[in-house]
Image (cartoon, grey):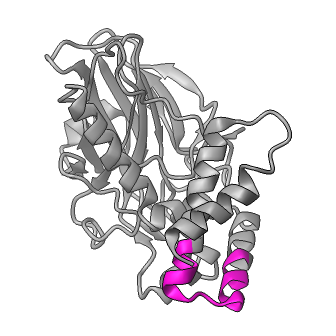
């Protein structure tokens, strides 16, 4: 069929058959996606076996709860970020800390404190370096923002996240810190490590077909929000990781690379209340003031909640 015939067929099946109330937006999207799929079947001569194997793959990925991981691995989340950047630019919104992907591993409800939080439960303190992350939350003109909500989460030394990894304690390496009256936040935690997709999982199976690895560099995720400001979804990746600029999820962006500095000064070690040398990362955040009719930065998606 040519495209006109395909469009007529899809309309006949998915529009003309309506007998009750219609969600016009859902109908518009479904008609377009089905039409594009039919066109791809024509252009690529996709066989029935290939089509059903594709549907079986999506079923398996859903049952494995890996569709969020797949969206990152195929670049869908990064593409949405690029579209959001362009929408901001068209609306005259500039500046601020760059956005990047959320990923599928956020959990709502992390313990909340003001100014400082220890994120780890101590179970890995003898296995991996202690890390202090600190920074200041400001607006784009450098004015500090008190009470900004800084939500932070990252993986443990095995590349696993609490809640999804049942061997970890509740909310291990997950905290919400409200910036103090100087706009500052400090998190005591452990050094995150890079990790790969589950080697026997559905995402890695597809990446193998594409000749791609499924590895991420070491990184730390953030949500940062404050009344009157646009919510920021971001993360920093850590300098020196072999996958820093070869992230399978395409999340590394200019302005989001952090250096972990070794701190060996005895006085500073004592001031921090730890018993050994540690690593330190500075990650300052600039929030953009909200504007009337600006593109939203709030994304309605299903997220885990403990």
In the image, 263: left or right of 41?
left
**Residue 178, horizontal then vertical, whole percent:** 43, 19
**Residue 110, horizontal then vertical, whole percent:** 60, 32
Whether residue 127 is visible to the viewer of this picture, yes or no, is no
User: Please, is residue 215 above or below residue 20 in the view?
Assistant: below
- The residue depicted at 75 percent of the width and 70 percent of the height is 59
User: Please, is residue 46 above or below residue 245 in the view?
Assistant: below
- The residue depicted at 56 percent of the width and 89 percent of the height is 45
User: Please, is residue 272 above or below residue 32 in the view?
Assistant: above
- The residue depicted at 74 percent of the width and 73 percent of the height is 60
Query: Which quadrant of the structure image shows residue 228?
Result: top left
Magenta-highlighted residues: 39-55
Query: Which quadrant of the structure image shows residue 92?
Result: top left
Residue 88 covered by magenta stretch? no
In the image, 230: left or right of 104?
left
Query: Which quadrant of the structure image shows residue 67?
Result: bottom right
In the image, 244: left or right of 30?
left
Q: Main secondary structure of the magenta part?
A: helix
Taking depth in this image into account, of 4 and 169 the one nearest to the observer is: 4
């Amino acid at each position: 069929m040519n495209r006109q015939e395909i469009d007529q067929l899809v309309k006949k099946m998915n529009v003309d058959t309506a007998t009750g109330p219609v969600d016009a937006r859902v109908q518009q999207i479904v008609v377009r996606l089905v039409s594009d799929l039919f066109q791809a079947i024509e252009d690529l001569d996709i066989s029935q076996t290939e089509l059903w194997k594709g549907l079986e793959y999506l079923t398996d990925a859903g049952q494995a709860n890996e569709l969020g991981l797949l969206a990152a691995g195929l670049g869908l989340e990064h593409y949405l970020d690029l579209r959001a950047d362009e929408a901001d630019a068209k609306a005259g919104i500039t500046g601020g800390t760059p956005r990047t992907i959320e990923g599928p591993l956020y959990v709502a409800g992390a313990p909340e404190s003001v100014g400082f939080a220890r994120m780890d439960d101590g179970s890995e303190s003898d296995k991996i370096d202690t890390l202090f992350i600190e920074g200041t939350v400001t607006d784009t003109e450098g004015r500090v923002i008190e009470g900004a909500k800084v939500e932070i989460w990252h993986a443990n030394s095995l590349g696993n996240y609490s809640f999804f990894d049942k061997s970890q304690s509740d909310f291990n390496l997950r905290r919400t810190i409200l910036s103090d009256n100087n706009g500052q936040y400090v998190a005591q935690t452990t050094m995150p490590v890079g990790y790969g997709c589950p080697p026997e999982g559905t995402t890695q199976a597809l990446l193998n077909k594409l000749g791609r690895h499924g590895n991420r560099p070491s990184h730390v995720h953030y949500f940062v929000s404050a009344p009157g400001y646009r919510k920021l979804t971001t993360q920093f990746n850590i300098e020196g990781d072999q996958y820093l600029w070869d992230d399978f999820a395409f999340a590394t962006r200019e302005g989001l690379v952090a250096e972990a500095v070794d701190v060996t000064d005895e006085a500073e070690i004592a001031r921090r209340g730890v018993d050994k040398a540690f690593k330190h990362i500075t990650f300052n955040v600039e929030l953009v003031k909200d504007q009337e009719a600006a593109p939203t930065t709030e994304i309605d998606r299903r997220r885990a909640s403990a």
